[in-house]
Image (spheres, rainbow, N blue to C red):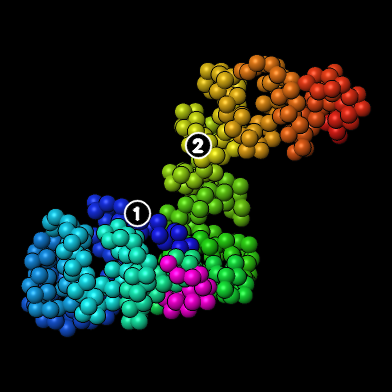
Amino acid sequence: MYGLWLRKYARRYKSHRNRSPVEPNLVTEEDEAEINSIEASTPMERGLMYFRGDGVPQNYTKARELFEKAAAGGHVQSILYLALIYYEGLGGEQDDKKALVLFDDAAKRGNAKAMFALGRIYIMGHLLEQNYEKAREYFEQSARQGEVEALLNLGMMYYEGVGVSQDYSKARVYLEQAAQKGAAEAQNNLAYMYIHAKGVEKDLEKAREYYSLSARQGNMQGEYQLALMYWNGEGGEEDHSKARGYCEKAAYQGEVNAEYFMGNIYYYGQGVSVDYKRAAYFYEKAARQDHGEAQNMIGYMYSEGQGVSKDYKLAIYWYEQAAARHNVQAQYSLGYIYLTGQIVKLNLIEAFEWFYKAAENGYVLAQFNLGVMYYKGDGVPQNYEQAVIWFQKAVDQGHKKSSFILGKMYIEGQGVAHDHDKGMALIAQGDG
């Protein structure tokens, strides 16, 4: 869980150009109350109007100038916004040094969000040398003031043991506080802990409760996980209708696994009428997010013209994308395409290479086809010993045709020592 959180912020801080213009939860209802209590003519109020584009055209340069005036008078919220502007490079050149000085100033004046910002900077090590102890100290200072993001991140540090000794009990305490303040990520993480008995007794009802809280906020992870629990009847009633509803909400927000799940629902008609067009829509959405199984499915649908116009080029494209992600069905499909030469020019070498990848990953039909190619010398030099190896792998998975051929090879002593009894047994197994 912490790894996902860490990668999320790593992407945010990868380059200044990729930074989000507004940090999450920078302005809370308490801030709004403070701002609304200030006369509209104050520099802070006017700066905020330009920062947001509220009633005036958004203008970060003017906002910065006005925040600087307010900050000169010691207004801590203005210092925080000014730090953000320099950090993000809004309305001018990005300046990390100024941003750090301002975050530090606001933190020393007791601003919880500035403390949190410094904690995150230290934990990521993107402006200052990575220092987990400093990060934890700033998060703790911020958390003591009830800053929800600080509570969440402290919880995840203790959950994963990053910079601290792993402690599920402490993790739960911080995450529960964040969850009570409405942090959907904390709610999801607590649900995960109750499902997997991490520092708590396994409690699927409690897990469903936390996912429900997250889903009510429109969090796509909470929606998807709640959908799975309704689908499988975990932690309460089984309700496929509710499951589809939550899953579809998550899918429309771009949750890739929910998109794939919705594709399956419509493709196989799970509680709904089969609808290849809808299935293709969801599969392709997931495929564009590098979901290997979805790429394989949309590749198949393009090859068959199911829900989409038949398009062999797109079929091969999506099969290749899926195969690159080690999807064995896509690897096998590419091998079969090159073996038959019905869609592309026959290419036994390409066929062999794709079958080999799928066979190594345990795909039984690929193992059988490799055996045949070695047996006949198609695309590779004839090699009975290799044929025996791959036929045997397929036999071990219950492939009857491989058993029949391998039985004949034992009888004829091809690639193995002659063994009539074993050969007949294999043939009988293949006929069974």
* Residue 258 vertical position relative to residue 375 in the rendered view, above or below: below
Label 1 vs 2, first from the N-terminus: 1
> Gap between marks 1 and 2, in whole Å?
23 Å
Residue depicted at x 71% and y 24%:
386
Q: Extreme right residue here?
A: 421
Q: Is residue 135 above or below residue 7?
A: below
- Residue flagged by tag 1: what amino acid is it? Arg
User: Where is mark 2, residue-wise?
Assistant: 324
Direction from residue 350 to residue 413 in the image, left or right:
right
Q: Is residue 88 left or right of residue 372?
A: left
Using the image, tell me which numbered label, if any, was put on residue 11: 1
Q: Is residue 148 visible?
A: no
| Label 2 Cα crowd, 10 Å radius (few <14 / some 14-19 / many 20+) | few
Specify the segment rendered in magenta. Answer: 163-180
x, y percentage for residue 337? 57, 25
Say which residue appears at 64% left-offset and 66% top-offset.
Answer: 233
Residue 311, percent across and down?
48, 30
Q: Is residue 58 above or below residue 332?
A: below
Q: Mark 1: which secondary structure?
A: helix
Choose between 79 and 254: the one closer to the eye. 79
> Is residue 173 in the magenta section?
yes
- Name the one closer to the observer, 133 or 234: 133
Q: Is residue 382 above or below residue 127?
A: above
Under mark 2, the amino acid is Ala
